[in-house]
Image: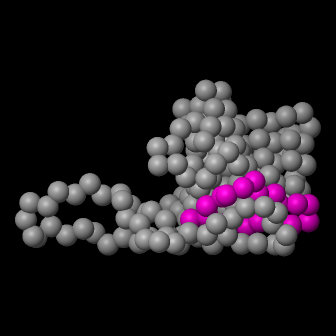
């Protein structure tokens, strides 16, 4: 595993050298940034970064959290991302945004969820992979657009409670106890 202080992992190699002509391909490490608490102003999480979640994150009404393609959000405990304002998380087919566990050997329920709670109507989660959560995505009186995503290895994949009407298009849910 390639690591450097202040940087996350990007590639894992299991290499045995039998001669000196073997070359490890080029790879890059992603810069790590610790995040947690209230997002107090419109914020952009950059692509090609690892965001280590160290406490619950709340995006309050009137505030937008935008996440760029290639960003990796790793939850370092049973925390959630609660969206009351706007989440604009738009990845790309070849550069998905990843929400995952920060544990070395992840398991279902390592972190809590992405929760849209009375969120503003134009929130969007597109080309994102959500894995190893208790509940992948939870909509509480919210109607975000969820498209082209993957929810996997969660206890519960997707929940839409009363008063919620999420627009769900082209997603894949797998390896969850409850879809």
**With respect to residue 44, does 81 lie above or below?**
above
| Res 169 seen here | no
| Residue plotted at (61% across, 69% down) | 33
**With respect to residue 175, does 88 lie above or below?**
below
Q: Quadrant of residue 67?
A: bottom right
| Image label count | 0
Residue range (magenta): 50-67
Q: Quadrant of the N terminus?
A: bottom left
Q: Is residue 34 left or right of residue 118?
A: left
Place of residue 37 in the rendered image (x, y in percent of width and height, measured from the top left)? 78, 61
| Residue plotted at (69% across, 65% down) | 35
| Res 103 seen here | yes
Place of residue 157 in the rendered image (x, y in percent of width and height, measured from the top left)? 66, 36
Place of residue 25 in the rendered image (x, y in percent of width and height, measured from the top left)? 28, 69
| Residue plotted at (91% across, 61% down) | 61
Q: Quadrant of residue 110?
A: top right
| Residue plotted at (73% across, 67% down) | 66
What is the image's colouring?
one colour
**With respect to residue 148, does 48 lie above or below?**
below
Place of residue 142 in the rendered image (x, y in percent of width and height, measured from the top left)? 87, 46
Q: Quadrant of residue 162?
A: top right
166, 35: nearer the viewer: 35
- Residue occupying the far left of the picture: 19
């Amino acid at each position: 595993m390639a690591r450097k202080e202040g940087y996350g992992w990007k590639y894992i190699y299991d290499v045995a050298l039998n001669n000196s002509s073997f070359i490890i391909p080029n790879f890059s490490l992603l810069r790590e940034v610790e995040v947690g608490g209230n997002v107090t102003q419109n914020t952009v999480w950059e692509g090609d970064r690892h965001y280590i979640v160290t406490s619950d994150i709340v995006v309050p009404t009137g505030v937008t959290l935008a996440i760029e393609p290639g960003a990796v959000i790793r939850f370092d405990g049973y925390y959630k991302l609660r969206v009351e304002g706007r989440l604009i998380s738009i990845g790309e087919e070849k550069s998905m945004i990843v929400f995952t566990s920060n544990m070395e050997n992840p398991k279902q329920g390592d972190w809590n969820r992405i929760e849209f709670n009375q969120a503003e109507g134009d929130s969007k989660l597109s080309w994102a992979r959500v894995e190893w959560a208790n509940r992948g995505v939870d909509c509480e009186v919210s109607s975000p657009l969820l498209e082209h995503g993957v929810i996997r290895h969660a206890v519960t994949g997707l929940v839409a409670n009363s008063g919620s009407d999420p627009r769900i298009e082209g997603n894949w849910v797998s390896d969850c106890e409850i879809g």
